[in-house]
Amino acid sequence: MPAAAAAALLSLALTLSLAAPADAAEDKPAPSASPTPTSTPTAPAKATACPDYEFIGARGSGEDNGIPAKTRYTSANPTLGMGGPVSDIFKRISGTAADNHVTIAPYAVPYPAVGLDVISGDALVSGDLSAYSKSVELGAHAAAAELERVSRTCPDTGVIMSGYSQGAQAIVEAVLSATPSARRALVAAVFFGNTFFNSANTADDYGSFAPGLDGYLVRNSAGAAQSVIAEALKGGAGPAAAAAAADGDTSGTGAADWAAKFDGAPIFDYCHDGDPICGLVDERKVDGTSYPVRDFAHIVSSTGDETGSPSILTHHTTYQRGDTANAAQQLRIALGLPLLEAGPPTAQVTAPTAAEVGAQTRFNAGGSLSDPADPIVSYRWTIDGSSPSARQFTTSVPLMSATFFTPGQHTVSLRVTTVTGAHAVASAQVTATAAAETAPASPTRITAAAGDGAAALSWPAVKGAEFYAVTDDRGKLLAAFTPLVTGQQTVSWTDTGLSNGKSRSYRVYALNSIGRSAASRTVSVTPKAATQHPAAETVSLPVPPTTLVDPELVWSLGLGLIVVVLAATLIRGAEGERRWRRPRRLRR
């Protein structure tokens, strides 16, 4: 695949909004599962009676952004301002609640939910997510304030929180920042495509996620401080410089225990295999050092697209299907509501298409679904069932690890069984290849190009390399990632958010399961500002201190006033100029 096409794939993919298609085929809730629309805002009014529950929902990136802010969070919007997947859950669960004389009030988190079209095409690679982060900050502020308000004014009201994509991150950060008393109001949480998804939290994880791949924020790209110091010392720096290299660095695992902050409230966290938002980062150990590898090759392989067309987010936009129906059933159990009738169980196994002989390979059956009233209690795995070397395992959780001992194609079969004995089957094919025998050679012919606040590196792919690591000249890990596709001839990486006029130096390493290469030669580049015409001065508007006012509406009104004032000034100036030029008429 040409390097340009590979770059286009990531760039085009990141310009997509993460909103689920409004007209996508989905399981429709039963007629009783849709509440009667009203014309009131979804944010709870100052009513004297408190509801039994409040449902705080946050939409995903770009969802509902085409709807005016003044009506976005009202029942005039079919999604109530929560976006497709989250509003679907609310409608399903609130319908059941109403039939059983239980009240659930909706609250759609008011925040920008910026689409990825406002983010650099290299954002997921470089980690420069400033516009996105500001949007999440506003959403988390609004959701946390509402959680605090409910716990204070309606202490007997239980709170259900839900978010999709960027909205899931906003909800998690809201809970992390909430007071202990506010968190005690939580009764359940549901997430789809969560940047904080942790594949190790098996009690909370649902969906066809790839085992071992976590969300974008569970592990960051800074790497382990131990590795940072070691690399700095290897590069000839003294102890003081080595300590400075590790300054501010984290191990990348601080976000892994976020679920503990939900104080025991059940969490239903859905992630699909191939979703780069919740299943991108794979922590790999090489020579005793952990690398949080952004596995783009797995994402592209899972989506089945190597043409450069923008489908890399396909598996991020399909949660409004059986997932929302299953989540609603889970919530009915959590709230003690009657369950809707469900069909027989379904089995699904997620497996890598390729594995290394002798290495542990992980499999997931989390995409298997059953009626929560008749849950799956047994997962029976069979490897190469028709061969003399057939092996069989039985687990009570949907995860299993196995090792292939011979190269070639292997079949992994799954049989799930529920409490009542109902069962379903599925299978997957895995191709095992011989393990590498030596560490890869050092990357060569590295080029560095200066950009506006950015530095772009590229180099020929190294034979035998499974992933690459980029450090600064002091050895601090900046990024670890796989190429987009197997066989890619040229590998590239862009560092963004840099200061223009300040030189930056980099080293590149190639790694596989055997070890890490020696460092490449150090390359340096000085970012420089792009030549551009003078622009109007940027006006910064204050962030609203309370969620009672929609931040986007404030921005819109503020910018609108600025435009009006500027227009009026120009008009007055033009009229004054015309009056000055017009000669005075003489009386005859």
Image: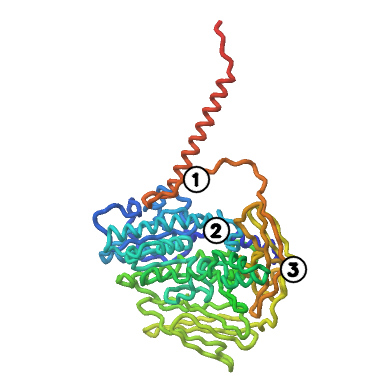
- Circle 2: residue type: Leu
Q: Residue at x 41, y 49 (%)?
A: 544
User: From the viewer's perspective, is 9 left or right of 94?
Assistant: right
Q: Residue furthest bottom?
A: 388
- Estimate the spatial distance between the alpha carbons at disc 2 and disc 1, rounded to whole Å: 19 Å
Q: Is 151 located above or below residue 348 in the figure?
A: above
- Crowd class of label 3 (few under 14; some 14 to 19; many from 20; radius 10 Å): some
> If you read the primary sequence from the N terminus, does the residue marked by circle 3 or circle 2 appear first?
2
- Residue 187 appears at what percent x and percent y? 33, 68
Q: Position of residue 466 (x, y in %)?
A: 65, 74
For badge 3, the amino acid type reads: Thr
Look at mark 1 in the image and give the residue it sits on: 540
Q: Earlier in the sequence, mark 3 or mark 1?
A: 3
The residue located at (37%, 56%) in the rendering is 145
Residue under numbered circle 2: 129
Image coords of residue 532 (percent x, y): 65, 44
Can I make out residue 326 in this image? no
Q: Residue furthest top?
A: 588
Do the numbered discs 3 and 1 sit on residues whose CB atoms are within 8 Å?
Answer: no
Secondary structure under tag 1 reads: loop
Which one is nearer the viewer's eye here, 225 or 424?
225
**Left or right of residue 484: residue 25:** left
**Is residue 82 something one can see in this rendering?**
yes
Reading the image, the residue beneath label 3 is 444
Question: Alpha-carbon distance for marks 3 and 1?
Answer: 45 Å
Q: Nearer the viewer, residue 401 or 143?
A: 143
Quadrant the C terminus occupies: top right
